[in-house]
Amino acid sequence: GESVGLHLPTLSVQEGDNSIINCAYSNSASDYFIWYKQESGKGPQFIIDIRSNMDKRQGQRVTVLLNKTVKHLSLQIAATQPGDSAVYFCAEKPSGYSTLTFGKGTMLLVSP
Amino acid sequence: KAGVTQTPRYLIKTRGQQVTLSCSPISGHRSVSWYQQTPGQGLQFLFEYFSETQRNKGNFPGRFSGRQFSNSRSEMNVSTLELGDSALYLCASSLQGSNYGYTFGSGTRLTVV
């Protein structure tokens, strides 16, 4: 498949480890945030979202943390598996708008 | 239910030609957004349509245009193609385009030669 990004920050972990992927967002007026996973040759796949009135949200094996004070978002993946290997993007949506602004992405490599 | 469908999956065009890409959103979704993805620039917003009206537009030249039909299907057109237009073009649909999950299609890989 085609590469979705060159020179992306890369996080390499061992299978079974917990992974933390970080994202600094740009707009203090953003009220909705999404994490996407993109595998080679595919479109971004929704993982989890969070609204600005929350600071933590949990899904299956994933947790998103939002720190509005420092405009920081993180995605925690528990017990990382080789199938989690992909590029992960955070996206923000400013209040009153309906478009997403994406971060540059982080490549997660999980070795067995 | 069916996801977001983009056609064609791959396209090769010559500089100066024009191209039309198609996106069928999830049934019931009325908002369709288009993004361009390149290795250098990442994912960049092109435009968003809601109920056949362009609601937002990104910072792209006028060669990039789009439209939405009454059944919410959307097309985007790029005229006078340039080599730099080579990219993965992604379409995302959502219920209303506001604080709801945006679901992406697999994209159309456009190569301009």
Image (cartoon, rainbow, N blue to C red):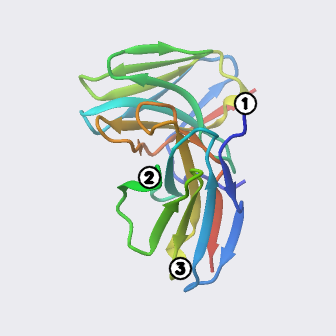
Q: What's the residue type where badge 3 is placed? A: Leu
- Looking at the image, residue B11 sits to the left or right of residue A7; the answer is right
Instruction: Give coordinates of residue B110: x percent, y percent.
Output: 63, 67
Q: Which mark is residue B48?
A: 2
Residue labelled with disc 3? B81
Q: What's the residue type where badge 2 is placed? A: Glu
Q: Answer yes or no: are tags 2 and 3 on the same subunit.
A: yes
Mark 2 neighbour class, 10 Å CA radius: few under 14, some 14 to 19, many 20 or more: many
Marks 2 and 3, the one that precedes in the sequence: 2
Where B65 falls versus A47 (above or below)? Answer: below
Residue nearer the viewer, A5 or B53 = B53
Q: What's the residue type where badge 1 is placed? A: Gly
Q: Quarter of the image containing the C terminus of chain A?
A: top right
Gap in Å between the C-alphas at discs 2 and 3? Answer: 21 Å
Residue labelled with disc 1? A83
Mark 3 neighbour class, 10 Å CA radius: few under 14, some 14 to 19, many 20 or more: many
